[in-house]
Amino acid sequence: RGFKFTTSSVDSGEAALDELLTAHAMGTPYHLVFMDWRMAGMDGIQTVQEIHQKFAGLDAVPKIIMLTAFGKHTIQQSAEKSGVDLFIHKPVTRVPLFNAILEVFGERVMDDQHAEVAVLNEELEASMKIGGARVLLAEDNTINQLVARELLERVGVTVEIVDNGQEAVWRLESGSFDAVLMDVQMPVMDGHTATRTIRTNPKFASLPIIAMTAHVLESAREESLASGMNDHLTKPIDIKQLYGVLTHWINPDGANLRFGRPPHGVTRMVCATGLLPKVMEGIDLKSALLRLGGQEAFLKSMLLRFTEHANIGNQIQAALQCEDFDTARNLAHMMTGIAGNLSAIRLQKAAHDVEVAIEQGLIQQESFLVVELVQALQQVLNAIQVLQPPVEQLPVDQPVGEARSDNTLDLEQTAIDPILKELSSLLELRDTDAELTLETLKQVMNRKSWQNDLQKLEERIQKMDYPGAQVFLKKIQDSMRSNPKFGCA
């Protein structure tokens, strides 16, 4: 409907066939069908075969795009043989969906340059309507938190983050927000429970609460609305959808003069280039960079942070062996969202396949899906290894009473000074490459007396609290100035 198409939907292959035949008889034929593969009764492939049989010899055969959360090659081959025009995987976001429609009708697909211009236009339009708004983000995964923060701060929205629904309830009591982005699956208190709790307070009756989930089913949207949420966003985050939903609920006509300008101190981050290889196996770099507005430094830092999830495949396998299906499903769901935001397409699909198979009670028969997830995860981890250049380590603190030579101190100063200057500049620019520079600093600045301040500096940078990070960086610089052996310009 967002593409200005006239649409209708049915819940089975039989109903789809009836609808197509009725519309054709009335002289209002359908031009395009999106066909799910797995359905009760006739599956998608059988339905497509029936459509081609019924419409044989007619001029009004609709184009057919098949959607599926599964990626078996045999299914794709069968679908193509049955007469499917295009085969795409769930979850589907706006640009790939539009390009798929263009492709089946023989039109030119949106190229990278046009897509980038479209993203910039969407950012500009959003900043003019919701710049200066305050949004509470309830999300338990760090990578998803940072991606959402990056996209929102880019258009001048101030973001505050909490890790679960209970914290969201508490934070609303002490702060003022224009909207809440609420992840559905979180520990302590899930998003639906949190929303129902929030709605019991009359002062939050009109507060926009928007669900965020990797679930693409209509039933997931209906559940969100039933719990008191106003709208529903799917992961991975689609820029146009995110900005469009927030604009609709915060300042739909752009008339509220309180919005439309970024808060003081928020600037567009500098786009450093050449930080990533041309190709990374398992990761669609073009898609990821398009989503992040070309921010290579930000994407690189997110990919490096992804290594925190290196054991998730083993954790899912262990949970399944113990028949702890809830834990296994939640882990797969989390990985679906993370991989989607990083455009790790194969891993995203593999994790979603596992999640769906668990929900449908088919994971034991389709255990190969877990193997595919583990292999896809390892492919991404192997690709990320090239982003971690070896750092030459300097000597660690000497035992008490053992002297350190002037040469060692001079070496530390030579190594540290330029890194501190670079880190200070990156913090001034609010550049996410600051996190990478900090990792280098930690390798060379390994005296125990600085570890506490370095840890606090790292915490601020990870939360993108750049002014707070500058405070601790200055403390470290002052400490070095007080030592005659360490001069910081």
Image: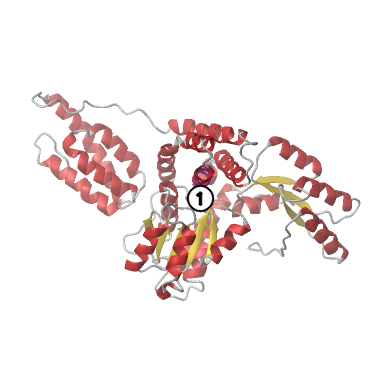
Relative image position of residue 468 (x, y in whole percent): 25, 53
Mark 1 crowd level (few <14, some 14–19, many ≥20, 10 Å Cα): many
Q: Is residue 344 magenta?
A: no
Q: Is residue 274 visible?
A: no
Label total for image: 1
Residue 405 in the image: above or below residue 304: above
Q: From the viewer's side, name the closer residue of 244 and 276.
A: 244
Mark 1, residue position:
291
Q: How is the image coloured?
A: secondary structure
The residue lying at 77 percent from left, 41 percent from top is: 80
| Rendering quarter of residue 302 | top left
Left or right of 146 in this view: 69: right
Residue 149 in the image: above or below residue 126: above
Residue farthest toward the front in the current orientation of the protein: 322
Q: Secondary structure at mark 1?
A: helix
What span is in magenta?
332-337
Q: Is residue 189 visible?
A: yes
The residue lying at 40 percent from left, 42 percent from top is: 301
The residue lying at 54 percent from left, 39 percent from top is: 323
Relative image position of residue 251 (x, y in whole percent): 47, 71
Q: Which quarter of the rendered picture does the N terminus lie within? A: bottom right
Identify residue type, mark 1. Arg
Relative image position of residue 327 (x, y in whole percent): 49, 44
Left or right of 96 in this view: 49: right
| Rendering quarter of residue 26 | bottom right
